[in-house]
Amino acid sequence: MNAKDVLCQGYLRPDGSKGIRNKVLVLFTVECSMHLCQKIEQHFQKLGQDVETIGNPSCLDNQVAIRRLLSYSVHPNVGAVLAIGLGCEYVRPDKIAAFAKEHGRVSDWFYIQEQGGTEKGFQRGIKIVQTMLDTLAATPKEPMYLHELVIGAECGGSDFTSGLAGNALVGSLLDGLVDAGATCVFEELSEAVGLKNQIMKRAATQQAAKELADTYNKTVDFCNAFRQYSISPGNMVGGLTTIEEKSMGAFAKSGQRPIQGVLKIAQHPPHKGLWALDVLPDERLTPCFYQVGDATHMTELIAAGSHLVLLVTGRGHVVGNPISPVLKITGNTETFNKLKDDIDFDASPLLSGKATMPQLTKKLYQTITEICQGEKTHAERLGHREGFILFNYQHPNQVVKTCQWNS
Amino acid sequence: MVSTQTAYVVTPEDNVATALGDISTGKIQLTGTYSEDKNGVSALQKISFGHKIALCAIGKGEPIIKYGCIIGLSTTAISKGEHVHLHNMKSCYDQRAETFDIQTTSSTDMEYKLY
């Protein structure tokens, strides 16, 4: 792995970013416009076109919700955005379209109420998206180097192999990527309970140490307030005994390199290197956080700018994402054989001793290069695009030390 | 996963290893990164695929170490070669740690009845 490795011919956006996909995003600003957006998405997907939808589920707004939508509208894998609102919600589709345009994306917007309803909105929508697709067909392509890549790491459906093989492999890959100047983001500080010392040792700077300590404390507060720890009876049947044990397995995917700091929801990494992402809300907005699964957490990694996400599983996983490819890895050979159509990469040779860590890391890097070059992941091939956006709240400017869960 | 009696050790400081297949009583082979003094463990009982085995004697209240990290404390004295799980260790953080049923792993602190 080298900073100057050419991963692929990236889609060059006018703001200088490069994407590994070239998508039109149909974005809903409120639940009420979701159906129309999905209708437009499905119309084009049936024609084999790269049109996707995602959006805000609430009639309300807050700074997190708006930043997330803005981040999607200028994601490097997205070339054009159509924002559709109903007409009476807080979030403004015109402002999202204007932001996307400022960042060099083709953009448009309308309100369904002004358009005259679902049918007329649909006709207008497909006309706009067709024009966008025609424009995007001429997107220039340029070599995309390894140091330009942003990659996300997530795990879900864990078993004992996750920590020993799948996450350990992702950790090894991330070490190589960080050394080559790429940007890596990992999530799941909620699965770091019991690891304060291990996390703090990895802080790159004093500021990073402060952010990591504050986020860790906030997370432990949250777990104690709800008496919910991220270890389930199924994990225990599989041999994991404590949250600390599961946490170490999950944290293994961050590798060994220094952590540059904590990203808040929809914050892009300020510079290259390894970053932790805090997805936990700062204040009580129950029951938002526990309405989540791995797919929703991956939407947050993608709001941080990830071109693609690695998802490690033990028991098996199937999900994907509308904006970025999701590459699934397991260290459990039985799971890999059983879910062969869904899981992209087999890390089990690490445990059987049939391959070494450097060999498998190299193979995984090769697979990632192929995905960047346009090879579809199983999730993309099967049409998986799960994950909804949560109506969470975080402080607009800083990583906070405690949450309001106890008050 | 692995047909022989094999258990995986993550770091040399670890006092438990993870079974890579269903282990029956008798000698086991270690893989991963382990210190030689931990080698030569015999399983005292059956240990299921993915479960932990003690690599040395562990006194009551002592740390259980995996990944070079304390993953909990023993709740009773543990012999070398014994199965290590909910029946003889617990989390230092999880407030529900001792509510899990040892046989079924279900939490026992929720009532399944109406008001």
Image (cartoon, helix red, strand yellow):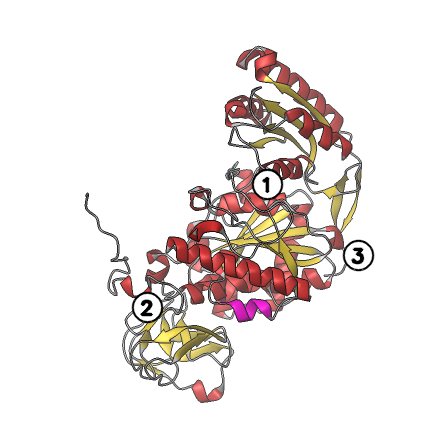
Image coordinates of residue A194 in percent, x first then y, are 47, 67
Rendered position, A141 above or below A369? above
Residue A142 left/right relative to A407:
right
Circle 3 residue: A4
Circle 2 residue: B48
Image coordinates of residue A174 in percent, x first then y, are 64, 60
Image coordinates of residue A382 in percent, x first then y, are 51, 38
Rendered position, A19 above or below A183? above
Instruction: Name the dominant secondary structure of the magenta segment.
Output: helix
Q: Nearer the viewer, mark 3 or mark 1?
A: 1
Magenta region: A195-200
Residue in the image at 48% along x and 47% along y = A294
Look at label 2 and name its amino acid: Ser
Residue in the image at 54% along x and 64% along y = A252
Q: CA distance from mark 3 to mark 2?
A: 47 Å
The quadrant where residue B22 appears: bottom left
Q: Chain of mark 2?
A: B
Mark seen at residue B30 = none
